[in-house]
Amino acid sequence: MSEIANLKPAAIWRNFHALTQVPRPSGHLEKVQQFLLDWAKEHNVEAFQDPAGNIVMRKPATSGYEDRKVVLLQAHMDMVPQKTPESTHNFETDPIETYIEDGWVHARGTTLGSDDGIGVAAIMGVMESADLKHGPVEALITRDEETGMYGANELPEGELHSDILINLDSELWGKFVIGSAGGIDVTSSLEYKPVANNQEKAVRVTLKGLRGGHSGLEINEGRANANKEMVRLVRKAIAETGARLASWHGGNMRNAIPFKAEVVVALPADQVEALKALVDKQRAIIEDEYRGIEKNVEFFVEDVENPAELVPQEIQDNLVNAIYACHNGVVRMIPAYPNVVETSSNLAIIDIEAGKAVIKILARSSREDMKEYVATTLESCFDMAGMKTELSGSYGGWDPNPDSEILNLMRKVYKDQTGEEAIVQADHAGLECSVILSKYPGMDVVSFGPTLLSPHTTTERFEIATAEPFWKMLIAVLEQAPKK
């Protein structure tokens, strides 16, 4: 058994360890859904799977607490499946291998899944305990949050009976989130008829080793986007060496900053060395531009078998120009809160090969008008390349309520337990609170959690020291929940 199973508080770590043993990548949740239902049955917890694939649990009030408002604890069951290039991990079959280093829990070569496995583990701890004092408690563990908030979007109305929603998907201890950004998926596609390859040689150009990161929480940290850096090289290679594009694959998650991209290009044999020199020069430019941010940049060329087909030249040029022009990163900050991102876009995934080009972007904003603006900007950019753009998966932002009753209680509990004032702010990340509120508008909502860093990347890590105060605060808030 992993050493994390013996950490304190046992209610969180024992359950989180159990979750790491169950495959739960987004889109493949059958095993974790059954695990949660079996676990609930074993612990005599009322539970069911709803038509959306969410797991709902209920626990009656402790004797004497029946007059308290009903509290909904909410987290998501899926995790982002990212792994290092050398990892052989299969997210659909293999458990996550964890280890402890310098006070943090890590995973070997993969994402850890503390986003949002820690929230799920905390829910399990509350539901299984016979010692806690609390009013009526519901739990909602949603499906496929990371790929489009599908579980929350498909949540049936009338299923929940709670007055208060405590979301357990925030990632900095001591910070209470009372608002979040909305988002929309922008998918541009184009089918083309490949042309025969008449070039003499072919190479694969790979860019990897970038930090990547969460496309909401870390979009303002100036990290390199592998697709945007690759297009700088590809455009030069076409202009200076006569290279022709055969394929492009970059990024694999809509809500993660891509840390790797690779292209296959064909070119005259006497231009291969010139291309290698361009790659070396571009690597040096990236290292200089991102000094202090990107420390492990790898940019290299490998010989490959010459492909039979290429992207037609005019389509190739249009695609490259559109990718080059496509906005990536922060659009603007919130004017009233200049340290918080308002609107952004993440050029997440590019797949070009075998007669089809698909480009996927996640645009975010805490303002609906700006979300529409940035989505239309992106649509216009790819329209000029002859691509068809689909806007999907739209979810609204969550408007802050600084006078929230549950927020005031949590601030008081935090001050009583730590002697410090909590940070209260809106986040640029997308939280399911906004979607749930659209179906249950009367709920009073706050999100909080312990500290984890670099979610959605293979350097995701959880700070052990924040688990105990997080758990202590959660059970105190449940005990002190307001009366009806």
Image (spheres, rainbow, N blue to C red):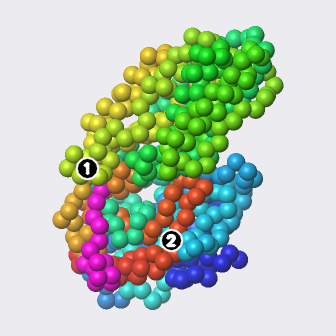
Residue at screen point 22% across, 45% down: 335
Q: Nearer the viewer, residue 344 or 18?
A: 344
**Secondary element at image label 1:** strand
Farthest residue to the left: give it: 403
Q: Is residue 202 visible?
A: yes
Residue 417 position (above or below residue 455): below
Residue 162 position (above or below residue 337): below
Say what amino acid the circle numbered 1 marks.
Pro
Q: Nearer the viewer, residue 26 or 424?
A: 424
Residue at screen point 61% across, 49% down: 296
Residue 413 in magenta?
Answer: yes
**Region of the chain picked out in magenta, as a range:** 411-426
Say what amino acid the circle numbered 2 marks.
Glu
Task: Indicate the position of residue 112 as horizontal and vertical percent values.
Answer: 59, 62
Task: Indicate the position of residue 317 as horizontal and vertical percent values.
Answer: 55, 15
Q: Is residue 156 visible?
A: no
Residue at screen point 25% across, 60% down: 442
**Occupied quadrant, residue 5:** bottom right
Q: Could you tell me how far apart the alpha carbons at marks 1 and 2 are, in whole angstroms?
A: 28 Å
Task: Indicate the position of residue 270 as horizontal and vertical percent values.
Answer: 76, 16
* Mark 1 residue crowding within 10 angstroms, few (<14) / some (14–19) / many (20+): few
To which residue does mark 2 refer?
Answer: 463
Residue 261 position (above or below residue 445): above
Is residue 76 found left or right of 374 in the rendered image?
right
| Residue 219, label in figure | none
To which residue does mark 1 refer?
Answer: 338
